[in-house]
Image (tube, rainbow, N blue to C red):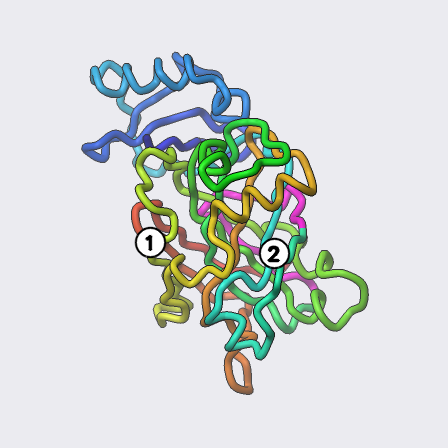
Amino acid sequence: MKLLRVGTAGSERPALLDAQGTLRDLSGLVPDIDGGLLADEAALGRIRSAAESGELPVLDATGLRVGPPLARIGKVVCIGLNYHDHARETGAEAPGEPVIFFKAADTVVGPDDTVLVPRGSVKTDWEVELAVVIGRTARYLESHEEALAHVAGYAVAHDVSEREFQIERGGTWDKGKNCETFNPLGPWLVTADEVADPQALSLKLWVNGELKQDGTTAEQIFPVAEVVRYVSHFMTLYPGDVINTGTPAGVAMGQPEPKPYLRAGDVVELEIAGLGRQRQELKGA
């Protein structure tokens, strides 16, 4: 299923995009799309049955904002330097274990919402990423099969980063990762049964119409199953938690000087095969 949330920010309603591309209203079945729903197999089954029967009301998508596909996110766990080609372009050695950092849940915005360039920023960068959404509480998972069984679905994430704040201003990466609007998510949460192989997805990103990133999750140093398994040994993952699994080559930081960092007025578009497309206009904070 392709689950999404539509409406003005803070007042989104749950919806479903059916197999014919028609937007359907879920608000008569469930109050929202969140961790509680993802952990409730009976509720998900009712949605599937209603979608297959065609009984869900149609929503007019004209002018309707698409919000983040998940409400009340607990935490956003991020994996750094997780693509072989991205490590090469930045001159970094491939890590021996996954690099973990966090984004605050309040950085998450809709897939087409405005992204704000922070005040004083000179190195705002783009990063298309596969987001993994957790559907079952995960602690100390032992196998890749067990890890994938805890995944509710997948989504497109844009891990916007300010590289000067991240690398040159002291401390950890957090200052360059947690600026307002720095994690557009969606448009859809695509349930795991629709993604046959999370290591066979193409990722693309354009800036002002120019293709910048053109990669595949096959390049991941630590595949999705290993990321989920590994993270569960350092923290408990709950339904509705999100893991951003890293970005392929093509970010501004990896380009020759002068590096083409983002500025107010730029337009970024990104997509992952089968998971949908985002478009953001950048403005000054």
> Which residue is at 50% across, 80% downward?
255
Q: Amino acid at mark 1?
A: Ala
Spot occupied by residue 190 in the image (x, y as percentages of width and height): 37, 37
Q: Neighbour class for label 1 at 10 Å: few (<14), some, many (≥20)?
A: few
Q: In which quadrant of the rendered view does residue 238 lie? A: top right
Residue that label 1 marks? 200
The one nearer the camera, 205 or 273, is: 273
Boundaries of the magenta span: 102-119
Q: Which quadrant of the figure contains the C terminus?
A: bottom right
Q: Gap in Å between the C-alphas at discs 2 and 1?
A: 20 Å
Q: In which quadrant of the rendered view does residue 229 lie? A: top right
Q: Which quadrant of the figure contains the N terminus?
A: top left
Mark drawn on residue 174: none
Verify whether residue 111 appears in magenta: yes
> Which residue is at 48% across, 50% downward?
157
Spot occupied by residue 115 in the image (x, y as percentages of width and height): 54, 55
> Which residue is at 52% across, 34% downward?
134
Mark drawn on residue 98: 2
Q: Amino acid at mark 2?
A: Pro
